[in-house]
């Protein structure tokens, strides 16, 4: 009886010990790590897959993923290690010697102290470099890896990005057990080099849409050139441009043109410049004073060219004064402060706000309103449109702003481009109707049904593949 | 020539950026073109500073009205430039104690930092704070019920404003469950998610197409008004 109890106790102890030992053991490693080129990309990505650890379901928390370092990266890491060690050693010596000097009451600019610091820093730096170099030599020849990502249990694929297509990469995956113990690493069988494809296939549908819209714009420009008359609806804000300039002339006050706060690489600023050209031409014809303060130096130079040419085409090159087109500041609220002050002091009769605006839109428009100026604004910043609508006499909303140049010039070429835009609108309309119809049908028949699921898949394809 | 060369440069730059988006082989070209612009914009800082000095010095010299503001602008500009470039009052970096200019110009406690923290930031914050008053005055004017559209705007604004306050929630809390959609907080969400989103998206689609069309006109040289007109 006694021996039976004893043997049970021994057995239980052995089971417990085995359990504890097993918990401290790492999980079985993943296997079969394979890398392949990522299709339709610029040669910067590889797809890596592996067979999950045999313990994936029971004892794997995560997988740690590594890739080999390139030669350049290794050299950089070595250089970084030297730099860090060097600076660390120098800093410690300097801090210690300055602290000693403070205790002894020696000033920091004492020449003897600085000499001692210099010598100590040099010696510390030499020692640090020697130690790092020894480490580098000791590990030379080993394949070095960089940690890339951590993946959850059950995940066995990863697309590795930002790779150099001139380098072949190897990969390593390690399973991390629920007890935190790592498995043996699984290393990829062959190093693989990413390949650059000729075309980014993920953007095929976008390129098709761009091609159709651009093609339509070019087609209608040619149609307009052939002499076919094209009509454009009246845009009150643009009709008012002449009225505003005329009013300023009658009142003997200036016209203020604000081209937004973005640089010349913003399409809204360029659209603003095209309107400035028309405003300047009208101002030159009416002999009105036009002032253009800018918040970017490049916008200033462009605006000067634009206004000068407009004055020239109006037959008034002598009236052009480049000092009226000037740079204020790049700072958003500094620019606003200048404009507000200037508007209150000089009281321009007409204010144009044409370009990209942010928080300053309402400050400018309200200041203009308070001085009784006729105000016309145009922007493609949807968040600022309500402010301009509330405070200005006329507002060019979104596409009207971009249509201004064509409208004001009346040139057939430009009117043709507006017609081309309508084709784009038709495409958008058709896609919207298709999307809405599919979702509505899916909702009617039920999202769980086969047809409903198919509709949902189609909508997902439309959203994530065609329109991305 | 004065028009042709800029148009060629614009077209080349623009089409390279478009092509680079679709053809991986040319991605580097797009990045290079973007760097060129950064270089130009950096040089333009000098152009801007020069123009600022010229305009304000002229105002002071001519004793034009408000020339005192110009004097203050130039003084502030030159003083900040001197303090920042000269790293005045900046202690050397602890790693390079022998080099007087090794510290960062933005070091906490330095005169440049002081100017930024106690002059620049309060001034810009003051300008920004004025926005609250301008919103009130613009709202007062916009919400006057003078026609049908203004009445609709006023009604919508009233619901949104009230629906985002505790009072709004309290006012309609008595509504039964089957009228839950009419509670002010839910009406607010519906207006923002349905009507506002629909209107916004319509504007965004128009803007996107306008941008595409305008870009194409500029790249093809159809619209040359930004260069001052169509004549060569």
Image (cartoon, helix red, strand yellow):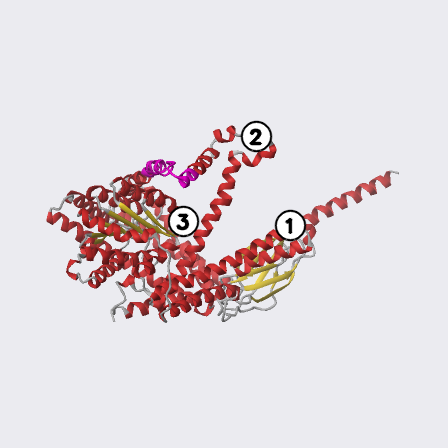
For residue B120, which quarter of the picture?
Answer: top left
Mark 3 → mark 2, Cα distance in angstroms: 35 Å
Residue at the spot of label 3:
A382
Near-viewer residue (A259 or A78): A259
Q: Which chain is mark 3 on? A: A
| Badge number at residue A444 | 1
Is residue B220 magenta-colored? no
CB atoms of marks 3 and 2 within 8 Å = no
> Which residue sits at x=32%, y=70%?
B8
Above or below, comparing residue B145 to residue A281 in the picture: above
SS for callout 1? helix
* Circle 2 Cα neighbour tier, 10 Å, few/some/many (<14 / 14–19 / ≥20): few
Q: Which chain is mark 1 on? A: A
User: Where does the magenta region start and end?
Assistant: B129-153
Q: In this rendering, would A321 be left or right of B155?
A: left
For residue B27, say whether it is visible: no
Q: Position of residue B174 (x, y in %)?
A: 56, 28
| Badge number at residue B175 | 2
Is residue B139 magenta-colored? yes
> Which residue sits at x=41%, y=61%?
B212
For residue A255, say whether it is visible: yes
Q: Position of residue B75 (x, y in %)?
A: 18, 45
Q: Position of residue A355 (x, y in %)?
A: 33, 53
SS for callout 2? loop
Mark 3 → mark 1, Cα distance in angstroms: 34 Å
Mark 2 → mark 1, Cα distance in angstroms: 30 Å
Label whose residue precedes the other's in the sequence (3 or 1): 3
* Labels 3 and 2 share a subunit: no
* Circle 3 Cα neighbour tier, 10 Å, few/some/many (<14 / 14–19 / ≥20): some
Q: In this rendering, would A214 be left or right of B134?
A: right
Near-viewer residue (B218 or A15): B218
């Amino acid at each position: 009886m006694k021996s039976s109890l004893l043997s049970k106790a021994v057995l239980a102890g052995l089971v417990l010990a085995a359990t504890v030992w097993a918990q401290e053991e790492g999980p079985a490693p993943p296997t079969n790590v394979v890398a392949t080129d990522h299709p339709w990309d610029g040669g910067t990505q590889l797809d890596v897959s592996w067979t999950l650890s045999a313990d994936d379901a029971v004892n794997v928390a995560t997988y740690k993923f590594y890739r080999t370092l390139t030669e350049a990266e290794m050299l950089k890491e070595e250089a970084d290690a030297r730099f860090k060690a060097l600076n660390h050693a120098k800093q410690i010596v300097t801090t210690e010697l300055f602290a000693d000097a403070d205790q002894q009451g020696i000033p920091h600019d004492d020449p003897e102290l600085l000499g001692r610091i210099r010598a100590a820093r040099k010696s510390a730096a030499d020692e640090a470099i020697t130690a790092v170099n020894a480490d580098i030599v000791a590990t030379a020849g080993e394949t070095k890896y960089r940690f890339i990502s951590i993946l959850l249990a059950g995940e066995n694929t990863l697309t590795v990005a930002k790779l150099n297509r001139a380098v072949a990469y190897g990969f390593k995956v390690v399973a991390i057990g629920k007890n935190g113990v790592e498995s043996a690493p699984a290393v990829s069988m062959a190093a693989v080099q990413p390949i650059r494809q000729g075309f980014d296939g993920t953007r095929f549908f976008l390129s098709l849409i761009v091609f159709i819209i651009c093609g339509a714009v070019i087609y209608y420009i040619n149609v307009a050139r052939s002499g076919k008359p094209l009509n454009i609806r009246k845009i009150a804000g643009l009709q008012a441009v002449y009225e505003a300039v005329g009013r300023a002339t009658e009142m003997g006050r200036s016209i203020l043109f604000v081209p937004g706060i973005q640089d010349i690489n913003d399409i809204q600023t360029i659209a603003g410049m095209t309107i400035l050209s028309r405003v300047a031409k009208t101002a030159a014809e009416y002999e009105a004073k036009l002032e253009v303060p800018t918040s970017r130096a490049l916008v200033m130079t462009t605006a000067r060219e634009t206004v000068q040419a407009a004055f020239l085409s109006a037959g008034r090159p002598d009236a052009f004064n480049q000092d009226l087109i000037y740079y204020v500041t790049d700072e958003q609220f500094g620019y606003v402060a200048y404009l507000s002050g200037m508007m209150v002091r000089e009281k321009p009769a007409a204010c144009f706000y044409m370009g990209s605006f942010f928080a300053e839109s309402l400050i400018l428009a309200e200041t203009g309103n308070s001085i009784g100026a006729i105000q016309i604004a145009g922007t493609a910043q949807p968040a600022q449109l309500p402010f301009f609508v509330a405070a200005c006499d006329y507002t060019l909303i979104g596409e009207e702003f971009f249509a201004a140049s064509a409208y004001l010039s009346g040139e057939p070429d430009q009117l043709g481009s507006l017609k081309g835009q309508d084709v784009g609108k038709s495409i958008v309309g058709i896609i919207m109707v298709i999307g809405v119809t599919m979702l509505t049908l899916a909702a009617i028949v039920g999202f769980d049904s086969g047809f409903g699921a198919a509709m949902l898949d189609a909508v997902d394809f439309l959203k994530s593949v065609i329109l991305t | 020539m004065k028009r042709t060369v800029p148009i060629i440069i614009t077209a080349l730059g623009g089409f390279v950026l478009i092509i680079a988006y679709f053809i991986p082989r040319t991605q580097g070209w797009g990045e290079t073109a973007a760097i060129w612009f950064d270089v130009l914009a950096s040089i333009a800082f000098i152009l801007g500073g020069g123009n600022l000095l010229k305009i304000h010095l002229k105002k002071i010299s001519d004793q034009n009205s408000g020339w005192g503001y110009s004097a203050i602008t130039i003084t502030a500009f030159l003083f900040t430039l001197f303090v920042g470039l000269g790293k005045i009052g900046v202690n050397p970096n602890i790693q390079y104690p022998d080099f007087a200019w090794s510290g960062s110009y933005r070091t906490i406690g330095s005169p440049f930092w002081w100017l930024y923290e106690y002059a620049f930031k309060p001034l810009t914050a003051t300008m920004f704070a004025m926005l609250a008053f301008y919103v009130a005055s613009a709202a007062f004017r916009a919400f006057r019920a003078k026609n049908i559209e203004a009445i609709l705007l006023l009604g919508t604004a009233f619901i949104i404003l009230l629906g985002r306050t505790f009072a709004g929630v309290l006012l309609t809390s008595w509504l039964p469950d089957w009228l839950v959609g009419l509670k002010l907080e839910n009406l607010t969400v519906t207006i923002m998610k349905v009507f506002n989103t629909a209107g916004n998206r319509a504007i965004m689609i128009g803007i996107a197409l306008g941008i595409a069309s305008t870009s194409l006109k500029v790249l093809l040289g159809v619209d040359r008004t930004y260069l001052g007109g169509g004549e060569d």
